[in-house]
Image (tube, coloured by chain):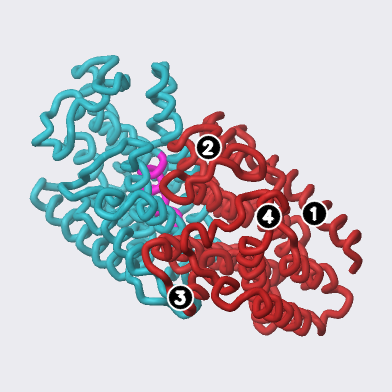
Chain colours: A red, B cyan
Amino acid sequence: MGEDDFLERLGRQAASVERMLGELLSDAPRSDETARPARLVAAMRHGVLNGGKRMRPALVIESAALLGGDAEAALRVAAALECVHCYSLIHDDLPAMDDDDMRRGQPTVHRKFDEATAILAGDGLLTYAFDILAAPETKLPPAVKMELVLALARAAGPGGMAGGQALDLEAERRALAEDEIVELQRMKTGALIRFGCEAGAILAGAAPEQRARLRRFGEIVGLAFQLRDDLLDLTADSATLGKAAGKDAGRGKKTLPSIHGIAWTRARLAGLIEEANALLAPHGEKAAMLAALADYVATRKN
Amino acid sequence: MGEDDFLERLGRQAASVERMLGELLSDAPRSDETARPARLVAAMRHGVLNGGKRMRPALVIESAALLGGDAEAALRVAAALECVHCYSLIHDDLPAMDDDDMRRGQPTVHRKFDEATAILAGDGLLTYAFDILAAPETKLPPAVKMELVLALARAAGPGGMAGGQALDLEAERRALAEDEIVELQRMKTGALIRFGCEAGAILAGAAPEQRARLRRFGEIVGLAFQLRDDLLDLTADSATLGKAAGKDAGRGKKTLPSIHGIAWTRARLAGLIEEANALLAPHGEKAAMLAALADYVATRKN
């Protein structure tokens, strides 16, 4: 798949995801609910509808399409995943965590609103993600929804993303060993990306072997995402990155690129892409977009 | 039911819930997870295993028992609900929210650990609640689990507890009208208590009419809980309360007792108990414990 085609398709999907999120994050009351407070909804929208690349949703949508899953259900699952991702960014940005003032050229939620509202907006998005999965509008069999809820809760929970974030706090207090760094990253960023790919297989009702294949593919994309992130932090300038570069070194945080060097990292990234392509090979041309996504994650400039 | 019998049974149930929570909140890795970081688990345990009265879990357990639900499944649903309740306390206690140093005679999670860990412990508990509901160990049909996930997400989300908390922030900036105060309380404390009663009916596979009855019963218990809380804040001394009294007045927050007075509040509480008893009447003696719970909520001293 050519780069133009890829970016065009990614952009089209991002627009669908954005539209779905915009609808989901309204402050209109639903049948069995009282109205959502306007300021809370505004904070949630600010944290979500920010023009993100929607890479995780694209993984859900493409994995589902590859295995014959329903496109509308995939879009809703993708939106639920993006809500979890955005909640994690809102909480990560808080003064007690990374203390970031800006994200994607906009003030972070606690800067635009206030700290308490940012905490609640994150809490609200995390909770709402499970609402979206379970809601009748997500037209999937109950057993499939259940698998999605379980997989998302484990990817995001104390044994997944929240746990990885806790290890990251620890990394500021003491230098982690290399295997601890790998574990941290597998949890902090890897688990949610892996869920994106596995979710496509789950919602498509894929056979265990195919689900395991997509799960492994997602694991590889997660590893590549993090390696690329760490490499960019080491080598890119802040203008290209759109955020502060050199943050890890500045905080004394070791990463695999800072331990092993740039050449090792590039070779490792190439190896990961090779494995990703091998996993997708049985699907032929149908998997071109997923392959392009993996390649993009490993080579992106920001 | 006599007060001694009631307190003995409530204590026995609290001990079962405590045991279940202790097992669930271990740092042992599960089959498909990496290990949970020890410090995060310790913070989650500190926020949960604190000798609470476990009033919400008791509502789940008794509602389920009334309608013939499985006791083991009810205990797990009760534990999930308590995780959500405790997450909300951890986040409410944060400096950016209520800024409380002590809870139940112990330092709050952010005082015992640190603010970032408290945020993550809350996030972890909220996420884990959905894990507990969806996990294979919770032996309920997928469609029933799905209903529980949806009902819990709505009770806790932006149209429920998180939304109520956001309105509560607003109440510190401007005086709310009486109907806004009622709405706030229905969301902030009412929704989760109502879920406790409705969850028992859901997991027992109750008919819609019975589910609606338990839901209404839960609504009444929620209203009584909040009225009693506000009344105690107005009239009790801090020693009896085990926490600071007069906090609402101190912050200029209006409550129904502060608007309408003590006599009105007592009459309203009596009316609520009467309605609760009428709803339970068709169940006769089988509902004695639920009736005693409602009475306890409306008359407790702390």
Badge 3, how many Cα within 10 Å: few under 14, some, many 20+?
few
Q: Secondary structure at mark 4?
A: loop
Query: Mark 4 or mark 1: which comes first in sequence?
Result: 1
Quadrant placement of the C terminus of chain B:
top left
Q: Secondary structure at mark 2?
A: loop
Distance of label 2 from label 4 (alpha carbons): 47 Å
| In the image, residue A186 above or below residue A51 | below
- Are the residues flagged by discs 1 and 3 in contact, CB closer than 8 Å? no
What is the number of the mark on residue A237? 4
Residue B78 position, x and y percent, is: 34, 57
Quadrant of residue A13 within the rendered picture: bottom right
Distance of label 1 from label 2 (alpha carbons): 30 Å
What is the number of the mark on residue A180? 3
Badge nearest the viewer, 4 or 1: 4
In the rendered image, which residue does mark 1 sit on? A13
Residue A101 in the figure: left or right of residue B49 = right
Badge 4, how many Cα within 10 Å: few under 14, some, many 20+?
some
Residue at screen point 53% across, 66% down: A155
- Where does the magenta region start and end? B191-205
Discs 4 and 3 share one subunit: yes
Residue A146 in view here: no
| In the image, residue A81 above or below residue A256 | above
Badge nearest the viewer, 1 or 2: 1
Residue at screen point 56% across, 36% down: A43
| Chain ID of residue with mark 1 | A
What is the number of the mark on residue A33? 2
Distance of label 3 from label 2 (alpha carbons): 44 Å
Query: Mark 3 or mark 2: which comes first in sequence?
Result: 2
| Chain ID of residue with mark 4 | A
